[in-house]
Amino acid sequence: MDKITIEGTSKTPTIIFDSETGLLELKGRSIPENSIEFYKPVVESLDKYASDPKDKTSVNIHLEYFNTSSSKCILDLFKKLEAIHKTGKEVVINWYYEEDDEDMLEAGEDYQAIIKVPFKMIEVGD
């Protein structure tokens, strides 16, 4: 499988998904015009990856802001990761948030309550 690298813009996050190392990263702002289309290649790659995942999959989410439609797409990604986790493979989601960003911390906690995958909340200073 190919490595996916999507360069971030002012409206879309940088996304890196490397199936060889089991690493998925989202960083930046996620307010694309069409979230479903934007996240589609990552969702499809995760589907393929789920058929033969690495023993450990690491996910780093470091978003400054995301809109409602992006939150649904992120949840879809997490559900695919949850399915991998249920097969006995290790999946860890590292949720990064700025120390003064209560909204992003709460968003991570909301996902953590929904998805049965280990979450690590990581506070980052300015």
Image (cartoon, rainbow, N blue to C red):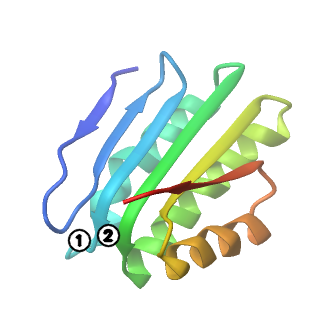
Who's the residue at 61% across and 67% down the image?
108
The picture quadrant where one finds residue 30 is: bottom left
Q: 44 or 107: nearer the eye?
A: 107
Q: 102 or 2: nearer the eye?
A: 102
| Residue 38 image offset from top left, x and y in percent | 27, 60
Q: Height in image: 116 above or below 59?
A: below
Q: Residues within 10 Å of mark 1 (few under 14, many from 20)?
A: some
Q: Secondary structure at mark 2?
A: helix
Q: Height in image: 90 above or below 73?
A: above
Who's the residue at 64% across and 20% down the image?
54
Q: Quadrant of the N terminus?
A: top left
Mark 2 and mark 1 in contact (Cβ < 8 Å)?
A: yes
Q: Is residue 106 left or right of residue 88?
A: left
Q: Height in image: 52 above or below 11?
A: above
The picture quadrant where one finds residue 92 is: top right
Q: Is residue 69 left or right of residue 58?
A: left
Q: Residues within 10 Å of mark 2 (few under 14, many from 20)?
A: some
Q: Amino acid at mark 1?
A: Pro
Q: Amino acid at mark 2?
A: Ser
The residue singled out by tag 2 in the image is 35
Q: Quadrant of the C terminus?
A: bottom left
Give the spatial CA distance, label 1 vs label 2: 5 Å
| Residue 81 image offset from top left, x and y in percent | 65, 46
Who's the residue at 48% across and 75% down the image?
100
Q: Is residue 40 left or right of residue 14?
A: right
| Residue 42 image offset from top left, x and y in percent | 40, 45
Q: Is residue 84 left or right of residue 66?
A: right
The residue singled out by tag 1 in the image is 32
